[in-house]
Every structure is written in structure tokens, then in C-alpha cells.
């Protein structure tokens, strides 16, 4: 088992933000315009 699994920040009772899917949420759910946003695929 992982050494720090009991202390993950997402298990706390506080706000936890990641960048995964943030653009999708801002564009499609919050209807925010991101004119300089350029998604890159590798």
C-alpha cells in the first residue's frame, strides 16, 4: 500500500482543485469564452 494514501488532499473536507477537465468545465458548463486557449495533443 502507498505510504501517503491516508493523507491525500482530496480526502480532506476542504476545497480541492485540479486541472484535469478544467477547460471543459469552464467552456461547456460555465459558458466562459477562452479566446486564447489552444488545446494541444501529442
Image (spheres, rainbow, N blue to C red):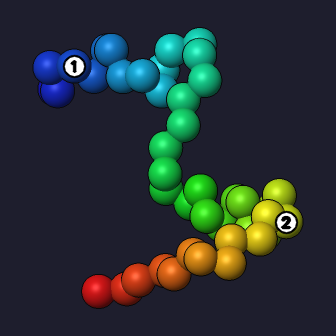
How far apart marks 2 and 1 lie (CA) works out to 37 Å
- Numbered tag placed on residue 31 in the rendering: 2
The quarter of the displayed image where residue 23 is located: bottom right
Question: Residue 32 in the image: x percent, y percent?
Answer: 79, 64
Density class for disc 2 (Cα within 10 Å; few <14, some 14-19, many ≥20) is few
Residue under the point 72% across and 60% down: 26
Density class for disc 1 (Cα within 10 Å; few <14, some 14-19, many ≥20) is few
Q: Secondary structure at mark 2?
A: loop
Image quadrant where one finds the C terminus: bottom left
Residue under the point 60% across and 23% down: 15
Marks 2 and 1 in Cβ contact (< 8 Å): no
Whether residue 13 is situated above or below residue 22 in the rendered picture = above
Whether residue 28 is situated above or below residue 7 in the rendered picture = below
Q: Secondary structure at mark 1?
A: loop
Image quadrant where one finds the N terminus: top left
Question: Residue 11 in the image: x percent, y percent?
Answer: 48, 20
- Numbered tag placed on residue 4 in the rendering: 1
Question: Residue 30 in the image: x percent, y percent?
Answer: 83, 58
Whether residue 35 is situated above or below residue 10 in the rendered picture = below
The quarter of the displayed image where residue 35 is located: bottom right
Tell which of 18 and 32 is nearer to you: 32
Whether residue 13 is situated above or below residue 27 in the rendered picture = above
Is residue 9 rendered to the left or right of residue 37?
left
User: In the orientation shown, which residue stands out farthest toward the front?
Assistant: 36
The quarter of the displayed image where residue 13 is located: top right
Q: How many marks?
A: 2
Amino acid at each position: 500500500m502507498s505510504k501517503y494514501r491516508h493523507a491525500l488532499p482530496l480526502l480532506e473536507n476542504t476545497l480541492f482543485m485540479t486541472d484535469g477537465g478544467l477547460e471543459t468545465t469552464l467552456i461547456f458548463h460555465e459558458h466562459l469564452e477562452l479566446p486564447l486557449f489552444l488545446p494541444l495533443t501529442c
